[in-house]
Amino acid sequence: MSEPKRRPPFFLRPWFTIPLLGLLVLGGAGAWFALSLVRKYEKKAAEFDLGKLDAVESASVVYDRYGQVFGKIFIQNREPVSLDQISPYLVDAVVAAEDNRFYEHSGVDFFGIFRAVLKNTQAGRIRQGASTVTQQLARNVFDLRDRTYDRKILEVFLAMRIERSLSKSKIMELYLNRVYLGGGLYGAEAASKGYFGKSAKDLAIGEAAMLAALLKSPNNLSPWHNLEAARQERDFVLTRMVEEHKIPPQVAEEAQQQPLVVLPKSHVVSQSYAIDLIRQQVQGEIGLESIESQGYRIYTTLDPVLERTAEESLRRELDVVEEGPDYQHQRYAEYTNILKSWKSAHPAPGAPPVPEYLQGAVIAVENRTGGILALVGGRDFVQSEYDRALQAKRPAGTAFTALVFAAALEKGVFPGSLFDDAPLDNRQVMIGGQTGILGEWGVERADNRYEGALPMRRIFAQSKNAATVRIGIAAGLDGVLKLAKRAGIQDDLRPYPATFLGSSDVTLADLVTSYTIFAGNGSRPERLMLVTKIETQDEREIYRAEPKRVKVIEPGIAFEVHSFLTEVMQSGTASNAHQQFGLKQFPAAGKTGTAYNFTDVWFVGYDSEITCGVWAGFDKPQPIFRGAFSNQIALPVWTEIMNASLAKQPPRELGRPIDLKRVEVCLDTGLPASAKCMLTTTADPGLPARKGTFFEFSTAKQLPKETCWLHGDDTRSFLRTLRSQDAPRATSATNVAQAAPVIMRAPTVLGDDPYQSIKPRPKEPAQLAQSGKADWTPAPRALPVDKPPPEVRRAEPVGPLDRQQQPPPVDLPTPPPVDLNDDPTNL
């Protein structure tokens, strides 16, 4: 009998050996893959130069529009110190808040990474990190900002390489000297001095905890941005320090009960308004918090000649204003001495006195792209970082009226129309109060007087306020507000007629943006820009601006307002620019603006290439002095800047749109002229006849269908002659001497209006029904009273400004024959 066949051991059976071999093959493949992956990333990590760890500062270079170095953004407030010059409380707070296993791992906290991988896998994207202090150091030094798994793995191997090369204390020292702590402060030493006015080695527990808390989100948690959020995060870090056995609980509780006190923010980084705006735009575009240490190449639209001219001319002109006999406020030189005395008496950082001297701002932009050529936000950036060109909102006065006229023309008002330059009850506008006569407020010249019916061109050129309000009424308040918004005025304007005269607050940058539509054929840049391109040190482009334009009005409307603006420079409120301030001969246009009570003066003007705006006033609104007109303060600054721009930005004449026709208009009716409108006789036979027409531009939509009705056939000429002579008048059929006197309930000019002389009394339904007329409004009647006649005082003589004056004759040369095919550039 044969022996039974022995069964092989289980480890030799196929069901065991085959899976085992498969597992061994897979394991070998996995090991080979892992080994190759490790070698790959070790090789990548070895390519980084660890010598850069000690290279703390790497300035970013700013280039102007011509490719020349304009300036550098570098670390003014970074003060590298050794670890023994940093409070141990800060080191413990950073370990507790950022990396509690810092002294245990070899550069990477694998437990933290595993936890982050699970949460990120569940979310489908990277939402949580587990970076150690060493990894953060590697990321900041070598700009590993991409949020990908490949970058994370490379960061791990680079951190392990750093750990093998440096000691823990050296790694912590490099980290605390490099890290960004908000508010433009870099490193523990600079942050300690900036926030608390003391060295990093003298930090208290609560102060150290607050600095460590800022690492999570330096800008958002900065106490200068959100004091309460900074305090809450400080308390959280103190709790973490207790949990990690760094401090006793009672010490943490005592620190948490103390208020968080920091110094006010001071100028710690920026050197000028332009450099400060560049820093803001770069950080906003690429989300970079440490631009000052990464060595970027920043290309801008700045023109160094215009920037220097703007700074110097503004400072020089305001110095002249302060030396005037009527100026009664703080002067720049006085505040400079006050500031020096204050610094001598207060060696520790603190809040200096606020300057109260006359301020100013300038911004010049390229019409085509909106690129900022020059930016001045005040007289001295060191004394005040407040950018008045971009942030200050003030009433623009009649500099705003260009948009009012544009809205009227867009609505279809004929540019040759006449509007009454006559007293207007201020209750309809309410500038400077609720009484009085409009025209007393905010005029652009000391010898202003009423001139009767005037063409729109002269009204605009001479800044006639009452007539401008009437034009605004014709345009409609809603139309003006909507046009201003489209033109680039970002702030909401007040929905009242006073806005017609620039009583609403706007920024200088917005007003300059709106003026670019007149030089831009009715369109403007979508936004102003300063930075055009950003490159890394290895010339890798990471940002490029893409200018866009927005259409606002039709080209014909833009040219019509442009022709009005040129009239301001030739015969209007800015006509003194050439003789008094030396404006060179080139095609220029602009508008003055003096706010009510002389609190703000503006001038915004342009040529075909650039638009420039100038503002002067106080941070706290108050009169500069009585008679402080913009054509004596803002205009000379604008003139000097525009003259300086001619070499690099030579202007050209703006062409007239093909659909815009040149029309001869009657000066008496504001309608297209007839053949008999050429000469108009005057009431005084001793004066010569004056020219009775002028030329204006008009679109087909605006052009009236009828021509002048006054200078037509013989009948109309007779009526015109009869009107100019003394004709007999009908006598009264009633003996007024026998009429009983009437007691007035209230004054008829000032105060209340009981007789509805300004606004009719509301209609009563019963009266409407009885009359059978839907538009009938009952007029109140004065009734005689049984009282003795009151004493009637005689009117006293009034001053010359109150007397009715005859308008001056307009002596213009005889115009050439109308040629609709003439040169489009001929004004």
Image: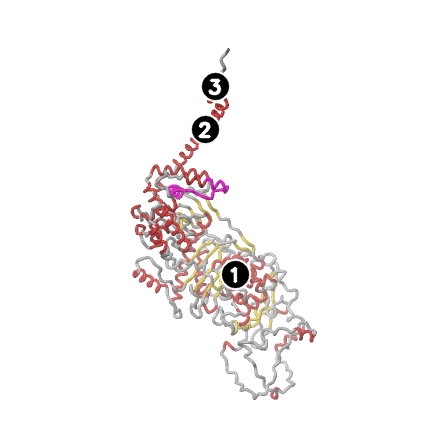
Kind of residue at disc 3 = Pro
Can residue 729 be found in the magenta stretch?
no
| Colour pattern of the rendering | secondary structure
Q: From this viewpoint, is residue 214 visible?
A: yes
Reading the image, the residue beneath label 3 is 8
Q: Which residues are magenta?
A: 117-141
Q: Label 2: state its secondary structure.
A: helix
Q: As rendered, which of 815 and 729 lies closer to the eye?
A: 729
**Place of residue 345 in the rendered image (x, y in percent of width and height, measured from the top left):** 30, 61
User: Mark 3 falls on what kind of element?
Assistant: loop
Q: Position of residue 441 (x, y in %)?
A: 49, 71
Residue tagged 1: 492
Q: What amino acid type is highlighted by mark number 1?
A: Asp
Could you tell whether 438 is left or right of 677 in the image?
left
Which residue, given by chain and number where applicable, does mark 2 sit on? 27
Residue drawn at x 31%, y 49% is 87
How far is the residue under mark 2 from the one under mark 1?
Answer: 69 Å
Query: Sequence-wise, which precedes: disc 3 or disc 1?
Result: 3
Disc 1 packing (10 Å; few <14; some 14–19; many ≥20): few
- Can you tell which quarter of the image residue 331 is in? bottom left
Q: Residues within 10 Å of mark 3 (few under 14, many from 20)?
A: few
Q: Residue furthest top?
A: 1
Q: Nearer the viewer, mark 2 or mark 1?
A: 2
Query: Which numbered disc flags the more N-terminal residue, 2 or 1?
Result: 2
In the displayed structure, 689 sits above or below 226; it is below
Horizontal side of 171 relative to 429 (left or right) equals left
Q: What amino acid is at disc 2? A: Gly
